[in-house]
Image (cartoon, grey):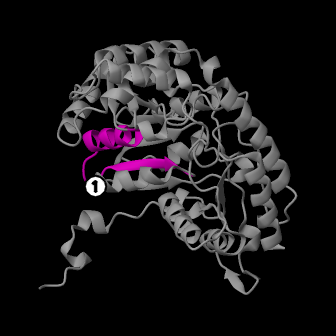
Amino acid sequence: MAVMTTAHLSDRINSLPTSQTLAMAAKARELRAEGKDIIGLSLGEPDFNTPDFIKEAAIQAINENYNSYTPVDGYGELKEAICRKFKRDNGLDYLPNQVVISTGAKQSIANVCMVLLNPGDEVLLPAPYWVSYSAIATLAEATFKEIPSSIEADFKIDPQQLEAAITDKTRLIIFNSPNNPSGTVYTEDEYRALAAVLEKYPEVYVLSDEIYEHINYGEKNFSFASIPSMYERTITVNGVAKAFAMTGWRIGYIGAPQWIAKACTKMQGQITSGANCIAQRATIAALDAPVSKIQYMIDEFKTRRDMILGLLSDIEGFTVNEPKGAFYVFPDISAYFGKTLRGTAIANASDLAMYLLEEAHVATVTGDAFGQPDCIRISYAASEKEIREAVRRIEEAVI
């Protein structure tokens, strides 16, 4: 029998990196299986249960025998609910034929990239950025270019940086606010300044990932598509995973120019077809509910943010800023590079993240995965007790 190797796999899969967030979570599970007490602060997943009113809508859908294939682009009733949500929360006017519902926001993003990008096209990624943006661009046979930022600038890029990055190959830029991994929230004025640059380049489209929109602490989310000159060139991506604690329900969606929505439906029809029927019915209830129904989770995240910032700021070598949204802190830990901690040489953020997992039994994620090699991402989607113990272990391990 011939021995199969990666040489028999496609160049496409061989060139694709493994998700560092999922890899760290897998390593943490291995250590737990060995009996280690691991505190997981690596995954971007709320630790709350899905609210009861959403679960009840799902149970009702089961009892009403929603069990058949769904339309490729989603139930009409859910698309109408999404249009209402866009209008209520974002001031955006979308029609149902501009909406496509997918199996998670990640699929929504992949659909957009697959229908807009050709081989050799360029995707601009303000760094730090979510790990899958670059991988999806690679799958679409495009290239990606990072636009760097710094913790001193609250991990934001400015108009001059954006203009300098645009070339004749630039086809798409991906904005994510509130941001994963940094928690950065762009203000309306900041987005309008960036839009003023993009107005000069009509061939460049914008993907605005707003999955964390409701998890913000004072700086209300501003949708890029609400800038009139950008509406026809912006694809707004959202979903119910984060704000509604529905990660496993796998529902994401886009609002987009109708011709892009139609193309995404065509793409999805050959990959997964329509999203889960029960999850779609439950999502109608989630989106039609006032945001006040989930405010208790947002309030708790803010309490945890304030607590973990206070704890981390006491650790010498951790430089932190104040994230305005999401549920991550993204400290600069470059002060440890070149040092040796308990016999372990720390050359970069990946070394420190692995050291913290193996020595302190705390799972974080290296900033390398997000295009920001001086940082690590720490999720505070965990209990206060776990957060306090995790930071205590980290401080003890780096002394």
Question: What residue is rendered at 31% in x and 17% in y?
Answer: 64
Start-end of magenta stretch = 104-127
Could you tell me if residue 317 is visible in this image? Answer: no
Asked whether residue 88 appears in the rendered view, the answer is yes
In-image side of 370 versus 315 (left or right)? left
Q: Residue at x 58, y 67 (%)?
A: 32
Secondary structure beneath disc 1? loop
Tell me residue 165's x, y (percent): 48, 49
Q: Would residue 356 be found to the left or right of residue 266 on screen?
A: right
Q: Is residue 150 above or below residue 14?
A: above
Q: For the residue marked with disc 1, what is the amino acid?
A: Glu
Q: Which residue is mark 1?
A: 141
In magenta segment, residue 112: yes
| Along the viewing direction, whichever of 349 and 66 lies nearer the viewer | 66
**Vertical arrangement, residue 33 with respect to residue 145, above or below:** below
Residue nearest the observer in this picture, 151 or 55: 55
